[in-house]
Amino acid sequence: MIRLQNIEKVYRTDTVETLAIDNITLDIAKGEFLSIMGPSGCGKSTLLNIIGLLDEPSKGSIRIDDQDTSRFSDQQMAKFRNQKLGFIFQSYHLINDLQVLDNVELPLLYRTSSAKERRQLATEALEKVGLSNRLKHFPNQLSGGQRQRVAIARAIVGRPQIILADEPTGNLDSAMGNEIMDILINLNKNDGTTIIMVTHDENMAHKTHRLVRLFDGSQVQ
Ligand SMILES: Nc1ncnc2c1ncn2[C@@H]1O[C@H](COP(=O)(O)OP(=O)(O)OP(=O)(O)O)[C@@H](O)[C@H]1O
């Protein structure tokens, strides 16, 4: 489903060149739950952002669903991202001025769905993560685990085939982290969503199907 071939990413400033990803080739199957681990600065987030088409590789190609993403125009890229991919971040990235329901509806604003349909889909997504009793709350009225559940609802509301999660349990204690992990495992099992997750936590990584370890931008396992 996702095929990365000879991916390289170099960040250049006036004085320094950093090789963040060094020749990574990786296939990720449909329905797979993959975790990426490695020490700080080894390129995990860079790789995830490249897979999520948020960042472009300096070299190499990415095929998703047999489409060569390097041939996409900016507009095609944005549409593809909006329809196929869902993102979850360590620090939730919710909009504090918007109620929970409005946060979750956001990705649907770029589609042609009606207001009623958007409300319905967002309510369903929040039910799925066990938050139907918090629709009118604002993010700062929720616990960390609840905020992350809102972020998951926002990631899944458009029914993406692929979820990219960058340390989704990184800010949570182990009980809340396990709850979030259970939600991700169920999404993967029941809906067949492909999930790629960066984590520092061996316990979380061992709950997934496959673990890829990076070191200095290269895959070592
Ligand atoms: N925008 C940028 N400009 C220059 N260098 C960058 C940029 N983003 C990342 N880097 C460098 O690329 C390397 C990989 O960074 P990345 O954020 O992918 O690591 P990481 O494994 O996710 O780290 P952490 O676990 O600390 O989040 C690091 O050496 C970092 O300093």
Image (cartoon, rainbow, N blue to C red):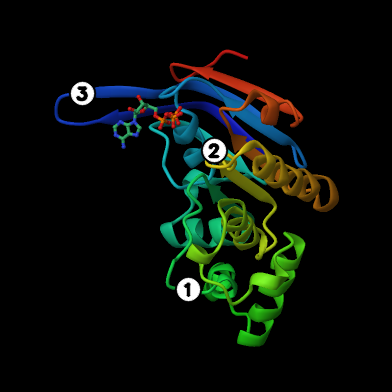
Q: Estimate the x, y position of residue 205 in percent, counting from the top left.
A: 68, 28
Quadrant placement of the N terminus = top right
| Comes first in the chain, label 1 or label 2 | 1
Q: Which residue is mark 1?
A: 98
Q: Is 100 placed above or below 166 here?
A: below
| Label tally | 3
Judge depth for marks 3 and 1 and give the one in front.
1
Foreground pick, 215 / 182: 182
Query: Under 8 Å from ligand 1: the CB of mark 3?
Result: yes
Q: Would you say the residues marked 3 and 1 are in contact, meaning their CB atoms lie under 8 Å apart? A: no
Identify the amino acid type marked 3: Val
Judge depth for marks 3 and 2 and give the one in front.
2
**Dot 3: element:** loop
Q: Quadrant of residue 33?
A: top right
Foreground pick, 1 / 126: 126
Q: Quadrant of ligand 1?
A: top left
Q: Is 126 placed above or below 194 here?
A: below
User: How many C-alpha atoms fall within 10 Å of the one at disc 3: few (<14), some, or many (≥20)?
Assistant: few
Q: Estimate the x, y position of residue 210 in percent, counting from the top left.
A: 72, 26
Task: Say which residue appears at 65% left-offset and 80% top-offset.
Answer: 119
User: How many C-alpha atoms fall within 10 Å of the one at disc 1: few (<14), some, or many (≥20)?
Assistant: some
Task: Say which residue appears at 57% left-offset and 70% top-offset.
Answer: 100
Q: Estimate the x, y position of residue 160 in percent, counting from the top left.
A: 67, 57
Foreground pick, 45 / 184: 184
Identify the amino acid type marked 2: Gly
Mark on residue 16?
3
| Comes first in the chain, label 3 or label 2 | 3
Q: Which residue is mark 2?
A: 170
